[in-house]
Image (tube, grey):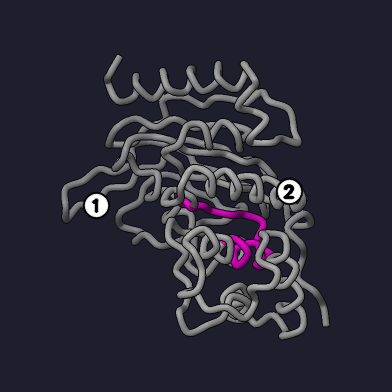
Amino acid sequence: MQQSPSPTDRQAGHGGTVYLDTVSVEFKVAGVLAVDKVSLNVKSGEFVSIVGPSGCGKTTLLNYAAGLLPAWACAGTFLVGGKPPVIGNRDIAYMLARDALAPWRTTLANAELGTEIRGVPVEERRRRALDLLEQVGLKGFENAYPKALSQGMRQRVALARTFCLDSPIMLMDEPFGALDAQTKLQLEEVLLQLWQRDGRTVIFITHDLSEAVSMSDRVIVMSARPGRIVADVPITLGRPRSVRALQKDPRFHELYSHIWSELEAGMGLS
């Protein structure tokens, strides 16, 4: 059986790229211009975070990329892997803010759900899921049901489920936003390790500036609605990184302060 190309193979072409040129999104029925003339070029293998005030269109951009918005609401050029967004695009894996685990499925069955839907053979999807569950620290919990897991453990399952897909582009909408500080740090470390291993393209939405600086190659700062890009900040910290170790790095704090200033300016607070 011919195997589908890996994320790395796809990134040799346009598979891992995301390109926006003067993209606007307007929900006319509600009279809301959510995003206004946003231009952005994300290269294959980049980890790009987007920060901005609530309601500025961050999640709207992810939904557009995933093909979840109606055509009448969107204007401008948006290309995902060199092609216009379309629902069901296998080049995309989308991790939501909540784990969205099926309560009737075990940890293992939840982790392999996406690959099952995509028709990956049983042995292959089981191998991927078991490997990812071990990577996220859930070895030994394969047969547990969601009700027996903490919120942090449930997010680990969701992270494993997302990485089980061979998609070169990962959209992540505040995946750790509901977690306590310690669990968030642990999962940030796990995500960095998985990303550094696979080299996929990640677009990561967060309200946590520390998280954005720690994880990213670039941080995109958006204004209050209608969302516009007010800053594109390169994160000049070496890789591989440790989220914990960065807390003691003065360059980390300089970047944090700079992004905070840009965020305040975009909200009209400075």
Residue of label 1: 27
Q: Is residue 256 above or below residue 156?
A: above
Give the residues drawn in magenta, as a range. 159-175
**121 versus 114 height, above or below:** below
Of the two numbered discs 1 and 2 in the rendering, the one whose residue sits closer to the viewer: 2
Amino acid under disc 2: Gly
Q: CA distance from mark 1 to mark 2?
A: 35 Å
- Of residues 188 and 46, the one nearer the viewer is 188
Where residue 90 appears, as percent x and y from the top left, is 60, 67
Question: Of marks 1 and 2, which one's residue comes earlier in the chain?
Answer: 1
Numbered badge on residue 243: none
Residue at 72% across, 48% down = 193
Q: In the current view of this chain or complex, which residue is farthest to the right? A: 1
> What numbered label is drawn on residue 199?
2
In the image: residue 101, left or right of residue 166: left
Side (left or right) of 39 relative to 268: right
At mark 2, the secondary structure is loop
In the rendered image, residue 40 lying in the magenta stretch gets the answer no
Residue 257: percent from left, percent from top? 48, 18
Please name whichever residue, 211 or 43, is drawn nearer the observer in this view of the structure: 211
x 42%, y 54%: residue: 64
User: What is the quadrant of the C terminus in the image?
Assistant: top left
Type of residue at label 1?
A: Phe
Q: Magenta stretch containing residue 169, yes or no?
A: yes
Regarding residue 62, the answer to whether it shows in the image is yes
The answer to whether 175 is drawn above or below residue 20 in the figure is: below
Viewer-closest of 125 and 180: 180
